[in-house]
Image: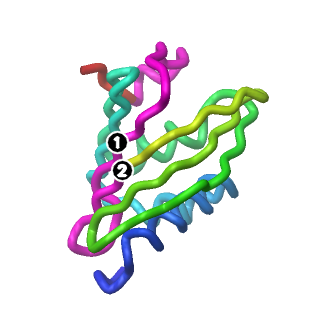
Amino acid sequence: MAMTTHAADVVASYWAACDARDWDAFAALLADDVVYEVPQTRERIRGRARYVEFNATYPGDWQLRIERIAGFGRHAASWISFVVDGVEQPGLCFFDLDERGLIAHLTDFWPEPYDPPPGREHLTERY
């Protein structure tokens, strides 16, 4: 992926692949050593395979809707509405791309602190 790709376009593709459950397309947007962090749960996931599995096995019946994406250069932010089992909540995610235009770091913010769903301990580290 050339660096001429705007970060907002990469993030739009990321959310489209996630919503479609197209895990191959989703993985293709991530750096091998991607780092994902959720401050509310203090979870951190390192590596493409672990992060794809984390998303592909997310519990519940969920959908998402993009509210807004803004980006410049190698940085972008998104605001989404995430619905899990009928409960809607907003989410903010900040993205950093590497020199190849792949997502290297993400930080997800949700409105309330919460305990992470069980069964994902093998994918995450707590901080």
Residue 124 to residue 105: above or below: above
Question: Hey, which quadrant is residue 41 in on the image?
Answer: top left
Report the amino acid beneath label 1. Answer: Thr
Q: What is the spatial separation of the Cα atoms under label 1 and label 2, in whole angstroms? A: 5 Å
Question: Nearer the N terminus, badge 1 or badge 2?
Answer: 2
Residue located beneath label 1 in the image: 107
- What residue is drawn where x is 38% and y is 50%? 48
Q: Are marks 1 and 2 in contact (CB under 8 Å)?
A: yes
How many C-alpha atoms fall within 10 Å of the one at disc 2: few (<14), some, or many (≥20)?
Answer: many
Instruction: Provide the residue span drawn in magenta.
Output: 95-123
Q: Say what secondary structure mark 1 lies in.
A: strand
Q: Tell me residue 97's x, y (percent).
A: 29, 64
Looking at the rendering, which quadrant does residue 66 occupy?
bottom right
**Callout 2, which amino acid?**
Phe
Residue on which disc 2 sits = 94
- The relative height of residue 44 versus residue 26 in the rendered view (above or below) is above
